[in-house]
Amino acid sequence: MTPETVTVVLPLPPAVLSQNARGHWHARAAASSKCRRLAQQAVESQQVQGWQQATVAAAFFHRIERRRDFLNSMAMLKPYIDGAVVDTGLLPDDDSEHLSPLPPSFGVDKATPRVELRFTRTK
């Protein structure tokens, strides 16, 4: 039986993936590739069978408390979601027919900054 929820814990996305970041395209591509690989490994380790539809909720934990741009934060997760969903086959695609994002939450964890992605099977 396949679980109804999969949670993966990953490092915060690197700043180079921010929509506001400036820099060489190669640095962004390398960071994106690494994030995809990390997410893929995290989901594959849970041995989940393919789903048809799911929601994804992101919980960000930063070292310091301050206001966060939630749209930019969600955009920085694109490589993680591609790795977790597309590369593993968790869902047929990461389009709006198969994956629905939920609003992110933000917390503080000085010792272990991270992002937790919780995929919940729907239908």
Image (cartoon, rainbow, N blue to C red):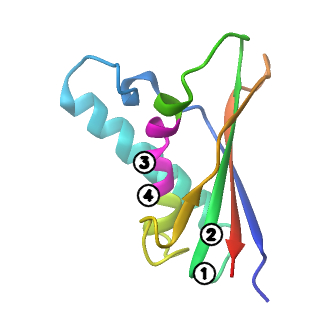
Q: Which residue bears the numbered disc 3?
A: 79
Q: Which residue bears the numbered disc 2?
A: 54
**Disc 4 and disc 3 in contact, CB within 8 angstroms:** yes
Secondary structure of residue under mark 3: helix
Can residue 46 be seen here?
Answer: no
Amino acid under label 2?
A: Ala
73 relative to 109 in the view: left or right: left
Q: Residue at x 64, y 62 (%)?
A: 55
Task: Give the Cα separation between the discs numbered 4 and 3.
Answer: 5 Å
Task: Give the Cα separation between the discs numbered 4 and 2.
Answer: 14 Å
Secondary structure of residue under mark 4: helix
Give the class, few, some or many, for how many residues have Cα within 10 Å of label 3's Cα (few <14, many ≥20).
many
Q: Which residue bears the numbered disc 4?
A: 82
Observer-nearest residue: 98 or 91? 98
The magenta-colored residue range is 74-81
- Does 1 appear above or below 57? below
Ranked by sequence position, the earlier of labels 3 and 1 is 1
Q: Nearer the viewer, mark 4 or mark 2?
A: 2
Ranked by sequence position, the earlier of labels 4 and 2 is 2
Ranked by sequence position, the earlier of labels 3 and 2 is 2
Task: Give the Cα separation between the discs numbered 3 and 1.
Answer: 19 Å
Task: Give the Cα separation between the discs numbered 4 and 1.
Answer: 15 Å
Task: Give the Cα separation between the discs numbered 2 and 1.
Answer: 7 Å
Q: Which residue bears the numbered disc 1?
A: 51
